[in-house]
Image (spheres, rainbow, N blue to C red):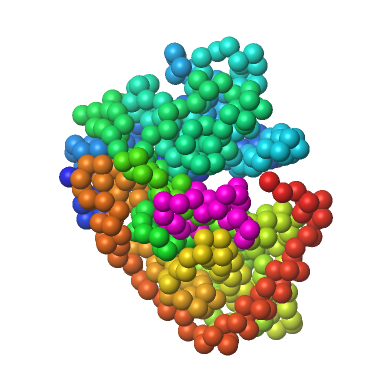
Amino acid sequence: MKVLVIDVGTSGVRAGVFDASGAARHTQHRTVLPSSPAPGLVELDPVALADAVVQVAQAALLAAGPVDGVGIANQRATTVVWDRASGEPVGPGIGWQDLRTVGTCLTLQGEGIRVAPNASATKLAWLLDQADPDRRRDLCFGTVDTWVAHVLSGGALHVTDPTNAGVTGLLARGGQGWDEQVLQALRIPPAVLPEVVDSSGALGQARALPGAPPICGMAGDQQASLVGQGCTRPGLAKITFGTGGMLDCCVGEQRPGDAVRGAAGTFPIIAWRRRGRTVWGAEAIMLSAGTCVEWLRDDLGLLASAAESEAVAARCDDSGDVWFVPALLGLGTPVWDFGARGTVLGITRGTGRPQLVRAVLQGVAHRGVDLVEAAESDTGLHFATLRIDGGMAANAVFVQELADALGRPVEVAPVVEATSLGAAYLAGMALGMWADEDDVAAAWRPGQVVPPRLDDQARAARRDRWLEARSRAEQTIPELSALDF
């Protein structure tokens, strides 16, 4: 049996065919970049995205032949609105990074409604205000998964799954149904919203593809990566180190706490839903990870490529007591300080290019430990090991710094991007390729296991030094530090 996975990221669309071994074959990719018409605005062209989805899917099927099902993985919270009858978008897609509705979020906060600007809720209201101020048109709202399912099904499907619905800011706290208070506050007609279906299960035919295979799995990118790394049992966690960093862990069938955000700065999420059974997780967020290496490359000119950071950092055994705090966009979990700023401490006349590059990798590693500690605090779980994927997972110096800072083994995913594999698992469970979540967990085989090298005393001393540096990075811009979503 084989499944086709369509994985829509922030900068492009990827398609690949997976067999029961979990191996990806016949991978295709098309670049679809967002635009920024003004500072703080991020938009995409839904029609161009739809065309790319069909192109890569058809190209993969042409190479691989017929498949038994289709899985979808996607960037979360990006918002699209289209006319139900014509299927035509009524405006641009609004990217998850877009900040045009910050003022609306602050106004809602004053009314006791907490919605973050990266969530879909206020983006949807903005699009409706532009296209349908009187709320009389028959329109459809969707995140990227919903739009892709609509395109592939020839307009027959208007669905989302709980992993995506849960980060729209519109889902009721218990994970069942939409939040009437938020809908009323933003004047969002319930008819605009998609049906919430299981993350794994037959949804409808992909009529836009040869053979019209069934769409039978969908999940937001971080939850798909969680499943893709076999974290389908409580107490298993992964971090995806991309432009930013996202820790997700599996908690079980009980929601972790009642708050929108835990005391240690993590968020309850729905990890997936299958056969009507909801599995919960927790998520911790690092705003700057790989972007710090890009800063070294693009702005400081210290690296010819991001990959070169490994070789340059390896020229020294440690950072020479130079400490870098990766707060280029503020701090996320556990501090949530939007006014924090990137900080470098401990520079001497002897500090060179290798020490600075290594300090940056070390700083991102310590932010990874921040996420682990916060997730353990908010969930009461302990992660014996940490699984990682994303571009930085290919950097051996970084992975060793992470293991040393954490004091536990780090398991590197056998593929750089586990997101597509997770969508394959969700679709495959619906088809019987994998029996259940335990079968998926048993399939996990790390590409590499990196143990820590430091003893507890040395690790604790380094950790204290870094936490001191982090505290000095906080509240650099007090006005932004006062904001809390």
The answer to whether any part of residue 46 appears in the image is no
Q: Residue 287 appears at what percent x and percent y? A: 61, 55
251 in the magenta segment: yes
| 305 relative to 104, above or below | below
Residue drawn at (75%, 48%) of the image: 483
Residue drawn at (67%, 37%) of the image: 113
Position of the N terminus by quadrant: top left
| Front one among 410 and 360 | 410
Residue 479 relative to residue 389: left or right = right
Residue 213 relative to residue 472: left or right = left
Residue drawn at (71%, 74%) of the image: 468
| 48 relative to 136, above or below | below
The image quarter containing residue 389 is bottom left
The answer to whether any part of residue 227 appears in the image is yes
Q: Residue 74 appears at what percent x and percent y? A: 44, 42
Q: Residue 39 appears at what percent x and percent y? A: 70, 40
230 in the magenta segment: no
- Say how many tags the image has: 0
| 349 relative to 262, above or below | below
Residue 119 relative to residue 343: left or right = left
| Front one among 337 and 375 | 375
| Front one among 98 and 309 | 98
Magenta residues, dominant SS class: loop
Which residue is most to the right?
Answer: 478
Residue 72 relative to residue 133: left or right = left
Which stretch appears magenta?
Answer: 247-269
The image quarter containing residue 232 is bottom left
Residue drawn at (26%, 46%) of the image: 429
| 383 relative to 161, above or below | below
